[in-house]
Amino acid sequence: MRIWKFGDDIDTDAIIPGRFLTEYEPARLAEHVFEGTRDDCRTGVCPGDIIVAGKNFGCGSSREHAPLALLGAGVRIVVAESFARIFYRNAVNTGLLPLVCHDTGGLVEGHEATVDIENGVLTSDCIDYPIEPVPPFMQAIIDAGGLVEYAKEMKEVEICTGSQR
Amino acid sequence: MGATLVEKIFSSRCGREVQAGEVVMAPVDRAMIHDITGPLAVRVFREMGGDEVFDPARVVMLFDHQVPADSVQAAENQQFMRDFAREQGIHNYDLREGVCHQVLMEKGHAAPAEIIVGSDSHTCTYGAAGACATGIGSTDMGFVLKFGALYFRVPESIRVEVSGAFAPRVGAKDLILSIAGDIGAGGATYQALEFSGETIETMPMAGRMTCCNMAIEMGAKAGIVPPDAVTREYLQARRPGAEIADLAPDQDAVYADRRAYDVTALAPQVAAPHNVDHVVDVGEVAGTHIDQVFIGSCTNGRYEDFVEAAEVLGDRTFSEEVRVIVVPASKEEYLKTLRAGLIEKFVEAGALVEAPCCGPCMGGAFGLLAPGEVSLSTSNRNFRGRQGSTEAEVYLCSPATAAASAVTGAITDPREV
Ligand code: SF4
């Protein structure tokens, strides 16, 4: 998989502009992913390619259209130095994997990379970059295949249980 | 160990003492959905096997982003939402009331010690009422609609202590812009901003809403003001007879950080393109040519904001080089502004006054920018492409600075007109 490299503070307006939010299908949203900011993504991203970014990826609007547009384009993993809170939740909920890597500076646009989630490492140009483990309650949602699957069979939830320090 | 405001709220709603960093499944007192993110939330609710929403009385629906419908698709989405509201017995303000956050506040849907979620990032506005309110995505909202609860990581808090009195034509928006410039776009991620100090204590509700509204621009989960007499007065009229919870942080509460600001010498602030934390004194960008001025949004679309703009405008007219778009945030604010004669004043000065809605704030419905154009806006985001072309530029400022600049046709210090 190839790396698509971005900087800090990539906002959800950049990922999918406001005028396309009447759409909800990932494939249709993908037709406008990064429109106007990274137009090469719309045609160039291949299934399995990864987004690599700096700090605060996905800041701004709560639009879930952002992870859906990335999923529609074939992206399954976003690696960033940090994520905006709502985007992080939305990504996990919809099946896009947000991975935190404290220093993405050395990763190069267009280069090949592999991600070994079990061992928490991203490898590119023969260099290993450690990836932070996903918080346990988020991992449970990922393991279920997203929040919809997680919630499907549940009749109700127990308030304030499942808590952990 | 003492507790912060949000720790107290989560503790009381969860029925046991919880601390920052814990992950809890907490009950939700109110859930807000609108025309843009609502349809997806409803679909997810169905996919989860949702049949009846947890409590129709706790769900608030309204349309504000694309109203009246600006495309067939928007109309279809609204129709879908109307049908859902009817089927579920949810109260739907439809497109009659205005911008979601203003409407939830003024209809008394937010009160101290409540946990409120909205499928919109600026839900943090309701911290002005002493609620712990946060924006969530549509899938989380689907979960809330089904279960009436959601996973939360109880946030650490940053205590923001503000002192001093504002100089004339400087106010809450300038304060929160300067705080955003200081803390940075991601500086409060996963945390809550707890506002305090004499400046906040004497600040009317409108200004508190402006401050809490922009907590998300620093990545915060919530912004919150300890409820006091100002909160009480605001709520008494909107929730007649309801008990209003007492809520204050403990003296020995543990904060992730404490930051102090003195507004005495604060100049009008402007966030320059394309980041909200790219904040400078107005003087540094004064003279920048502008094509459009937008006065409105959930940040600054209230009566108080229009009074501020009208005072700066005086008897002058707006520059013919500038398109001035004025959009009150709600019907209530519209009527107050109208009855005070300010709508007439703005129209006579050359502005376009639109009915309550989000307007040009999100670049969805109308008022979009062409490549190369520059907009000065009282809203909360100036991301590249936020108000139209990605080659346009958006500056953020207060209503006073917006009005002064609309008069001259270039970014102008409101103290100098
Ligand atoms: S006015 Fe702007 S920021 Fe506020 S809810 Fe509408 S689009 Fe969002």
Image: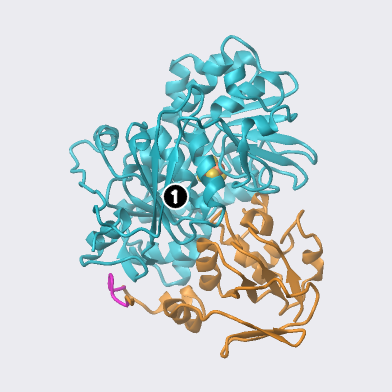
Magenta span contains residue A158: yes
> Magenta segment, which residues?
A157-162
Task: Tell me which corner region of the image, top left, top right, bottom left or bottom right, holds residue B349.
Answer: top right
Give the vertical position of B71 relative to B146 (above or below): above
Q: Foreground: B333 or B189?
A: B189
Left or right, B188 with respect to B379, comes to left
In the image, taking residue B283 as reference, residue B98 lies left or right, namely left
Q: Main secondary structure of the magenta part?
A: loop
Q: At 71% across and 61% down in the image, what residue appears?
A: A33
Report the number of numbered marks. 1
* Residue B102 shows in this picture: no
Please state the horizontal and vertical placement of residue B113, each as a whole percent of the image. Answer: 27, 51
Q: Quadrant of residue B290?
A: top right
Q: Chain B, which colour?
A: cyan
Residue picked out by circle 1 = B123
Percent across and percent down for residue B304 are 44, 26
Looking at the picture, the colour scheme in use is by chain
Question: Which residue type carries mark 1?
Answer: Thr
Q: Is residue B164 above or below residue A140?
A: above
Q: Chain of mark 1?
A: B
Residue situated furthest bottom in the rendering? A119
Please say whether residue B300 is visible from this viewpoint. yes
Tell me where residue B417 appears, x and y as whole percent: 61, 16
Place of residue B151 in the rendered image (x, y in percent of width and height, measured from the top left): 38, 68
Ligand 1, seen in the image, is in the quarter at: top right
**Any idea which chain is the orange one in this picture?**
A
Residue B154 lies, with reference to residue B362, above or below; the image says below
Of residue B2 and residue B107, the one placed in the foreground of this image is B2
Q: Secondary structure at mark 1?
A: helix
Tell which of A57 and B25 is nearer to you: A57
Whether residue B195 is in magenta: the answer is no
